[in-house]
Image: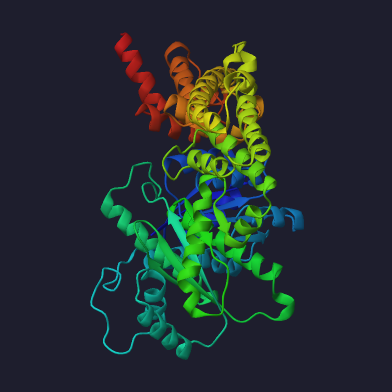
Amino acid sequence: MHKILVVDDEPRVSTGIKNFLLGSELNIAHVETALNGFEAIDYLRMETFDLVLTDIQMSRMSGIELMETIYMEQPHLPVIVISAHEKFDFAKKSLRLGARDYLVKPVERDDLLRVVGSVLRENEAIGRRSLALTEAQRGGAEKPGRPGMGELLAALVTEGDLPAKDGEALAALLSAQSEGGLFGVVSIRPDLTRGGFSDREIALQGRKLLKYASINILNECLVEWRGLSLSGYGNEIVAILRFDEPQAHERGAGIESQLHLIGQMIHMNLKSYLNVETTVGISSLHADVFMLPKLMDEANAAAEWRHTNPGQRVFYYEDRKARENLGIAAWIAQVDAYAQSLKAGTRDEGPDGNDEALLQTLRRLQDEAEIFNSYFGMLAYRLYGLLLEQGRANGMSLQRFDPDAYFRGLDAAGKLTALAAYIPEVSAMLGQLTQERDRTILARITGFIRERFRDPALKIQDIASEVHFSTAYLSYLFKRETGKNLWDFVTELRIEEAKRMLETTDKKRYEIAYAVGYESPEHFGRMFKRYAGLSPAEYRKERQGNDG
């Protein structure tokens, strides 16, 4: 049974849609209505919904702003937009934010049923297909008879130590069954330690379930490319793609665009349906099926590039090769990516991490003094610049990190040895400076909220603008530093102020609701009971009884 949230500042409209949907045959158990985006966000944070229908033009918070908040907090949640105006720019922006459809008022009942039914059926189908563990997926017995194309492809790609004769025979058999075209391999590295839509860490059995679900979703979304997804080592999933031989005008950029699209689609689908973060490495394409093991190596190499590009999710091997061929440009990009990882606190100092990748590049250049010193200087001064950038406002002396002093008089080998110590020192100092900066910013954030929490039009975007952060980073920073969600903090302030007013004044419920930032007394009553455990009237009666 489904739960739907309808958001419209015209109660007549939202009530009409509610009653119509509840009376339909769409297996809908509950429809909640919200008068504006602020109420909608509160409901979404309290309950789980399968679909949101929202008006696009509402006072205070538009449907677009509501969608932006939903996209940040619940990217899997489908949204259908309804508007009184058939404006292309509204439709385009809402669809770009992930809206499943766009309906124009007055909405035809048949259109509403068609669109809502389609979204709910799609969600049901995805859930059934992705989470149903079949006997075959559990490692059941293979069907007798001649192996199919999928089994042959899987054997050739995953059997890394396959004897040459067996490989040749397998490739020959594949060639006989294949209809030609091009093959490609995708290495998918989902982070299965966290997924689904809870904040709890996932145990081993749950990770297995998520992996099977991911494979099912990938098989669904790769049908157009005759994709085959199979379980690799650990959390890795391997996908094999097959393309028809492209026409002359489709080669080059057209194929690359298609591969990038596939990578982004894989990442977004796993994020949307399972809330799983993923790294995707994509090989080049080749017509010879015997090249599949090499393509697997390419896909793995592309995925490993995440160590030097922590903010990126999709990597195409041909891009990787082109960047490596750029020489100095590639080094600049690598240093910049490393600097970003230090700022974000995602530095990887393990044997295969981005620390080692930088040092390996420099080691290879030790015998070329001019190039080595150039590359070394770019890295050292980039790191020193990060410290100055973070430390300037603190009035802290960072002179000892100046590369001129730190590495003075050392040869190439000595610089590399010193660099191995310099990097963790810079990282630790950067962490300290960032922590001090974040505490200062957190004080600004909480001060701004305490001043503005009574404003019913307060949005997370307003708070983010005050400190010049993105809304995503603002939410991350606040949760990291305080252990609670930012909007929970806003709500708690409102409820605490409401408690104070219930205890010390004779104001009516609707007056208190308006005074603490709620435009609807009913919505205020629901939020109060959720946080305080009692209705406003019950709370006032209990406090007065205690005082007596």
Percent of width and height locating residue 302: 53, 57
Q: Which quadrant would residue 162 be assigned to in this image?
A: bottom left
User: Can see residue 148?
Assistant: yes
Judged left or right of residue 248, residue 29 is left
Question: What residue is drawn where x is 50% and y is 20%?
Answer: 432
Decide: is 281 above or below 285. Answer: above
Question: What residue is drawn where x is 41% and y is 83%?
Answer: 168
Percent of width and height locating residue 225: 54, 75
Percent of width and height locating residue 192: 38, 51
Decide: is 459 above or below 31. Answer: above
Q: Nearer the viewer, residue 420 or 425?
A: 420
Name, please, the residue furthest toward the top.
548
Judged left or right of residue 142, residue 32 is right
Judged left or right of residue 143, residue 31 is right
Q: Which quadrant would residue 246 be assigned to in this image?
A: bottom right
Percent of width and height locating residue 381: 65, 28
Its colouring scheme is rainbow
Q: Nearer the viewer, residue 172 or 412?
A: 412
User: Can see residue 520?
Assistant: no
Count numbered badges in the picture: 0
Quadrant containing the N terminus is: bottom left
Quadrant containing the C terminus is: top left
Decide: is 428 above or below 111. Answer: above
Q: Nearer the viewer, residue 536 or 355?
A: 355
